[in-house]
Amino acid sequence: MIKAAIFDLDNTLLKCRSSERLFFKYLVIHRIITIRDVFRIASAFLGRLFRLKGIYVRENKFYLKGKDMEVVKDAASRFFKERLVPIISCNAMEELKKKKEDGFLIILLSGTIGVLLKHFEDYCGADLAVGNLLASVNGHFTGEIEGIHPYGNGKAIVLKKLAEEKGIDLSESYAYADRYVDIYHMKLVGHPVAVNARGRFLRYAKRNNWQLTFF
């Protein structure tokens, strides 16, 4: 069977906590997202919060609602080259390349948006990349996502599906991630690796004798 090495992005391959948050700021600076958009996003967030749906905000990309797909994709390409490439961890890339040389299927599994993830997939030479697929209508994003949201237990659901479809032996596979919320999919593999772990996640990793590393 196939063995895989599954990598998270933020604070694992990347030396930052949220690449998508940086992308949002980039879109504001370049006026792709306007002040009116910011107020609309804030209103939508508060509305969901007051309806006790704030927990699901991660699953929506309100800031891209109505935006031209090609404009956003072009911005994502520039943003990746200008802002993200310089903060990709050299140590993480060395580990990824080593696993690839050892015959592992390289999978990027992240809750970030697909228009960003695609650039990571190409840059890293990954075999597969799974992130948030943005819904669109008539060439414009709707602000919603399609399919499973790969965050928390959603990553576990995605990984189980991939293992079944690709014939991956999870017991011989590695998973690299940096947050406690990632334990759901990390527990599925034989070799979970806690990256830059701290707090609750660090305690959990030590208690379960997981490998610790720092990228």
Image (spheres, rainbow, N blue to C red):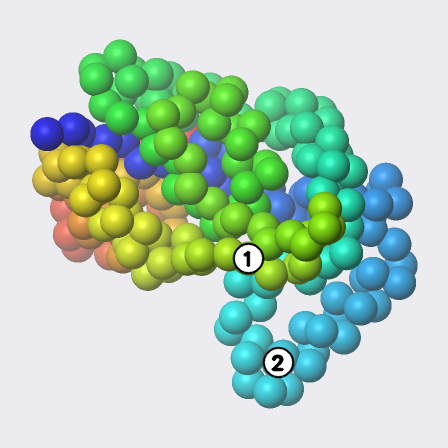
Image quadrant holding the N terminus, namely top left
Q: Which residue is mark 1?
A: 145
Which residue is outermost to the top? Answer: 101
Quadrant of the frame with the C terminus: top left
Total marks shown come to 2
Which residue type does callout 2 highlight?
A: Leu
| Mark closest to the chain's N terminus, 2 or 1 | 2
Residue 103's label in the rendered image is none
| Residue 42 position by quadrant | bottom right
Left or right, 131 with respect to 175, comes to right
Secondary structure category for the residue under label 1: strand
- Quick check: can you spot residue 160? yes
Residue found 69% across the figure and 78% down from its top: 46
Q: Between residue 26 and residue 166, name the one nearer to us.
A: 166
Q: Is residue 140 above or below residue 89?
A: below
Residue at the far front in the pictured view: 138
Q: Amino acid at mark 1?
A: Ile
Disc 2 designates what residue? 49
The correct choice, above or below, for 41 with respect to 100 in the image is below
Coordinates of residue 148 in the picture (x, y in percent): 41, 57
Q: CA distance from mark 2 to mark 1?
A: 19 Å
Where on the picture, by quarter, is residue 128? top left
- Give the residue drawn at x 60%, y 61%: 144
Where 15 falls versus 161 (above or below)? above
- The residue lying at 80 percent from left, 68 percent from top is 40
Inspect this view and state whether residue 183 appears: no
**Residue found 26% across the figure and 12% down from its top:** 101
147 displayed left or right of 96: right
